[in-house]
């Protein structure tokens, strides 16, 4: 149903020193960048063994606390909501990177179903500042700071980021399934302001589709593109593209780079603000925002029919207090 993500340079190993990112960004389409970071020391360690990678990562650990999700075995590694939808299916901890690696090593030796562990979005300048000296990303300005993601077999459901993104696999395999922004109506997206990843996620399972429950998911999958990254491979994900990320090994590591800050968050004021925030963006990015506005603001279909009324948050009917809270949120953003 899906097709492969197009590979820059016909799948040839990308020369990180000569690679120009501007053309890829201007096209507004995802691209696999094979081998972009294959010479990184962490990647070379990963090709030796998982243990070598873990030791190399631990050697960089500053001891700073990082955010870690712990999913019970029954979650099957999928980050999401609890059974009734009023909370999330994980516990949240703040520990050191070395503590995370120790826990992952113990789980990797287990023969049964193990809990999911996901270190998420740790700012590398804080948790392992020595990384930057020997792991360069020449196609990005130094001001674009890398973030670390480490875990076992964990799946983050389809969601989008408002920024450009380059994701680099540094250990294990990661499968990325991407959907154009316009597939929003076919992905059964949950609440915008109450999501386990901080970004709204699909309530359907693209990797285990239930077409009786989510019939429109079939069209989304027909428009999906997929890539599996090996250590050293990178993927460019344009802003507002939905992407599901599956970690496929007992130890996985990923470094990502986000850049371009989000635009600022009632009729004429909204029109003027939207023009100020969006009109000067590149054409592909404007089209992505157009799809979201059409779905959530101008569309004729009920964009929230699949979300229980009590869980619709800012997408639900607002009483006077709720409207006042939302206005204050927008005022604070400005």
Image: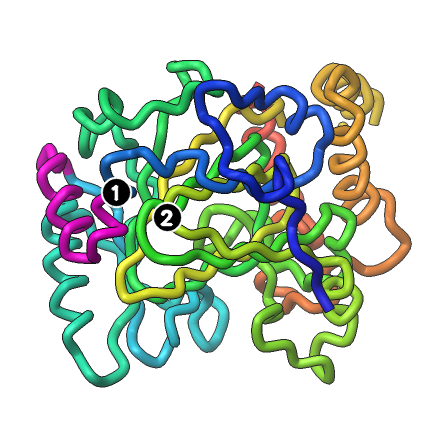
Residue 290 percent coordinates (x, y)? 81, 36
In the picture, the quarter occupied by the C terminus is top right
Q: Is residue 276 left or right of residue 147?
A: right
Q: How far apart in space, not on screen, are marks 1 and 2 (Cα)?
A: 8 Å
Magenta segment includes 223? no
Which residue is pictured at 68% across the width and 48% down the height? 318
Viewer-nearest residue: 92 or 24: 24
**SS at circle 1:** helix
Q: Earlier in the sequence, mark 1 or mark 2?
A: 1
Which residue is pictured at 67% across the width and 55% down the height? 225
The correct choice, above or below, for 328 with respect to 308 in the image is above
Residue 285 percent coordinates (x, y)? 73, 30
Residue lying farthest to the front in this orientation = 12
Question: Cβ–Cβ below 8 Å for labels 1 and 2?
Answer: no
In which quarter of the view is residue 35 placed? Answer: top left
The correct choice, above or below, for 314 with respect to 108 in the image is above
Viewer-nearest residue: 80 or 58: 58
Colour scheme of the rendered structure: rainbow
Residue 325 percent coordinates (x, y)? 56, 37
Residue 231's disc is 2
Q: Which residue is mark 1?
A: 44
Which residue is pictured at 24% across the width and 40% down the height? 42
Tell me which segment is drawn in magenta.
44-64
Residue 324 percent coordinates (x, y)? 61, 35
Query: Magenta stretch: dominant SS?
Result: helix
């Amino acid at each position: 149903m899906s097709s492969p993500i197009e590979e820059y340079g016909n799948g040839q190993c990308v020369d990180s020193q000569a690679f120009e990112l501007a053309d890829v960004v201007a096209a507004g389409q995802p691209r696999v960048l094979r081998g972009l970071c294959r010479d990184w020391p962490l990647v070379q360690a990963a090709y030796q063994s998982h243990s070598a990678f873990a030791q190399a990562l631990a050697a960089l650990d500053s001891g700073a606390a990082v955010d870690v999700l712990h999913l019970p075995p029954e979650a099957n590694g999928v980050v999401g909501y609890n059974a009734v939808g009023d909370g999330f299916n994980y516990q949240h901890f703040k520990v050191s990177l070395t503590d995370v690696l120790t826990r992952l090593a113990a789980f990797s030796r287990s023969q049964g179903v193990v809990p999911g562990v996901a270190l998420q979005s740790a700012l590398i300048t804080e948790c392992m500042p020595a990384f930057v000296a020997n792991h360069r990303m020449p196609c990005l300005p130094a001001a674009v700071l890398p973030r670390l993601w480490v875990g076992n077999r964990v799946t983050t459901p389809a969601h989008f980021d408002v920024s450009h993104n380059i994701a680099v696999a540094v250990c294990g395999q990661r499968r990325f399934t991407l959907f154009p922004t316009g597939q929003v109506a076919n992905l059964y997206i949950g609440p915008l302001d109450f999501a386990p990843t901080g970004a709204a996620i699909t309530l359907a399972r693209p990797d285990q589709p239930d077409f009786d429950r989510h019939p429109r998911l079939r069209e989304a999958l027909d428009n999906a593109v997929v890539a599996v990254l090996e250590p050293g491979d990178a993927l460019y994900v344009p802003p507002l593209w939905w992407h599901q990320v599956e970690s496929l090994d007992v130890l996985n590591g990923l470094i990502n780079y986000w850049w371009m800050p989000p635009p600022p968050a009632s009729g004429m004021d909204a029109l003027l603000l939207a023009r100020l925030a969006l009109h000067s963006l590149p054409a592909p990015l404007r089209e992505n925002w157009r799809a979201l506005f059409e779905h959530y603001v101008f569309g004729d279909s009920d964009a929230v029919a699949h979300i229980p009324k009590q869980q619709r948050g800012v997408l639900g009917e607002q009483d006077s207090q709720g409207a006042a809270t939302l206005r204050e949120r927008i005022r604070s953003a400005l």
